[in-house]
Image: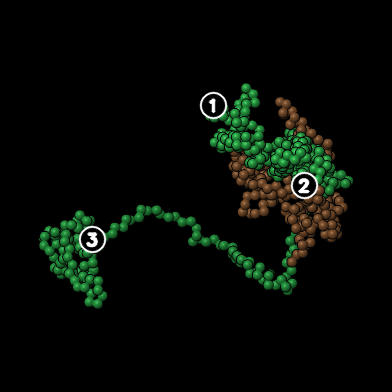
Chain colours: A green, B brown
Amino acid sequence: MNQNLRQSGVKFLNALSRHADLIMQVYLTGSLDERDHSPKVIDNLIQLGVLWRPDEEVGLRLKNAVRSLLESSLHDERNRQLDANIGSALASLKTLAQHYKEALAHSRYTESEAHLSDLTEHVYGLAESLSNSVRILFGRINNEFGYVASIDAKIRENELAQAQVSELLKQLEMFRFEELSELAGNNRELRHLLIVTLQHSFSKVTQELSIVQARLLALLGRFREFRGRTRLLKGFMLHMEQKPDFTPGNYTKLTNVPLLFNQAGSLIAPAAVDVKRVEHESDLQQLVGTIKALNRSHQQEQPERAAQKINVEEQSAVVFEEDKLKQAVEGYFCDVISTGKRITALEYLTENDLDFDAEAWIYQVIGGYQGLTLEEQTYFAIDTTGDSHPIYSGNYIIEDVELGLR
Amino acid sequence: MITEQGRILELLLSGAFICQVTDEEAWRYLKSAQNSDKMESQLNVLNRTLATAADGDVFFAAYQVLTESERKVLGNQFQEISSNLLPLVEWLLLVQQAAGNDVPVTQGSAIRLNELQSTIEDTPAYAEQLEKISRYRLFGSTSTTLDGQVKQVFKRLTDMGYLIKPNQEKQIYLATGKIEYLYEVIRFIDETEALSLSEQAEQAVQQGSLL
């Protein structure tokens, strides 16, 4: 029996986890769209008691037990239901306690054990449901019924919560500890469960409920204040729409002007400087120092600043004459091409009596060669003559270059 | 160095409304009966008295004895207040509706300008309402852009002491006790003129729900 119960429980939980997506979808949307899921899965869930169909016409919904399990573990604010059925819970506690006592009296210990564990479960269940109810109420108060938008809806929600609190308090009055104490007798286990545990949770819950009640009343007062203000503003707007020429009577003409409209005019003007106060001297000096002296003398007529006529002409174009040195280098290159002979730069310089500095000339020749395009460079062969530097290795001093055709 | 007492006296004499939001220290100072007695005797020298509004949330200086000249000042002030009521009420309702939580603006309410502006931008009815509000002489906006209108309205409200901006770099405004004063003025007019404004509003809502 126990084994079977365990197996079907595990099967049920597995089904929950396997179809978690489906269940959450139903939880969030309210009902299931049956076209999206296979009928086999749905049938299975109906059989397990996860889904049910309240009516032939409407869609499948989540069973309340599953829904409240989700609500309590997700701390969902939409959960407005409070379990306030303490009377029946207490009745079942009493019944179980009697079973337990009877079993003990007849020395049926295994049976009494089972009854005691059931009783424990019920007692803790009751305590948990009480503290859960208080938690739900606090949750709603703490975000000031933020899940509804308008003030009127908040007031309604507040009234619902207040009704629930008073219902819960009324139910709590059903706790009669003298009866429970009598029932428990001198049995230690029973006394612990029925008196200590329940009394503890009872006193905690009643204490918290009184705080909840006070907070609810304060909130209701605030909401009513808000509503009053909104109505005042809207009423004023409406009034002004209906009677646009409305002006309130001039209350300042009354013998006793209402304090509200008795607002004294402003009086304070900045103090003036006292130059004779010695202790202010340094401050004043600083102030004087920051004054900018702007001496704008009255300007006389300035003939030189008068408007003048400007002739706009086309600017003569500037033509750069090509560098003679560059021309000479080009001449040297052309000479090499036309004669086809190899000739060094310095030889060409002396042959043609060119009036350039030898070093500048060689630089220009090398530069001219390197300035050619790669294709043109391949037509020429350039050869340098010179020596390595006597002291600093890696330096090469060019004394002359020789140019020829390839 | 000015003493705390002197500082608060100066605030009162310059026509400021002192509440918990604008100047918490001064407000706490005036809350103590001993201090307010001291202040009272100093104000009396200048024919002024310490006045409170909105259940002691707001302090300001009132005249002790009214003669012709004081009445003239008060008359002008009253004209201004009563002509500013409608634009202010419209603005309060706009902010309340745009905030989406149906909570009226009260002392200490935080208004996030950027959020408010984007809600108004997304809702043409609010944008229209804002444009109407910003055109009132009280706000005097000539801007054609929504951004300019919002900025001008908030700037004016801050200048008049209905809002403060605690952090200059953030676009968050706090409603001051002067808003509470405003509610009290409307309530006073409602009672004195027997307008029964709340009932009118409630009836309108009920009729609206019937239609």
Q: How crowded is mark 2: few (under 14 residues within 10 Å), some or many (20 or more)?
A: few
Dot placed on the residue nearer the N-terminal end, 1 or 3:
1
Residue B148 in view of the camera: no
Which quadrant of the figure contains the C terminus of chain A? bottom left
Dot placed on the residue nearer the N-terminal end, 2 or 1:
1
Residue at position x 50%, y 60% in the image: A305
Residue type at tag 3? Gln
Residue ID for mark 1: A39
Residue A214's spot in the image, x, y percent?
Answer: 79, 44
Residue A268's spot in the image, x, y percent?
Answer: 76, 58
Residue at position x 75%, y 53% in the image: B20
Residue ID for mark 3: A370
Front position in the image: A195 or A347: A195
Front position in the image: A183 or B6: A183
Q: Do the residues indicated by labels 2 and 1 lie within the same chain of the protein?
A: yes
Q: Residues within 10 Å of mark 3 (few under 14, many from 20)?
A: few
Secondary element at image label 3: helix
In the picture, residue B207 is in which quadrant? top right
- Label 2, label 1: how many angstroms apart (C-alpha)? 54 Å
Residue type at tag 2? Arg
Residue at position x 83%, y 45% in the image: A252
Front position in the image: A22 or B178: A22
Q: How crowded is mark 1: few (under 14 residues within 10 Å), some or many (20 or more)?
A: few
Q: Exactly how many numbered labels are in the figure?
A: 3
Secondary element at image label 1: helix
Please, which chain is the residue tagged with disc 1 on? Answer: A
- Label 2, label 3: how many angstroms apart (C-alpha)? 113 Å
In the picture, residue A253 is in which quadrant? top right
Q: Residue furthest front?
A: A107
Residue ID for mark 2: A188
Residue type at tag 1? Pro
Please, which chain is the residue tagged with disc 2 on? Answer: A
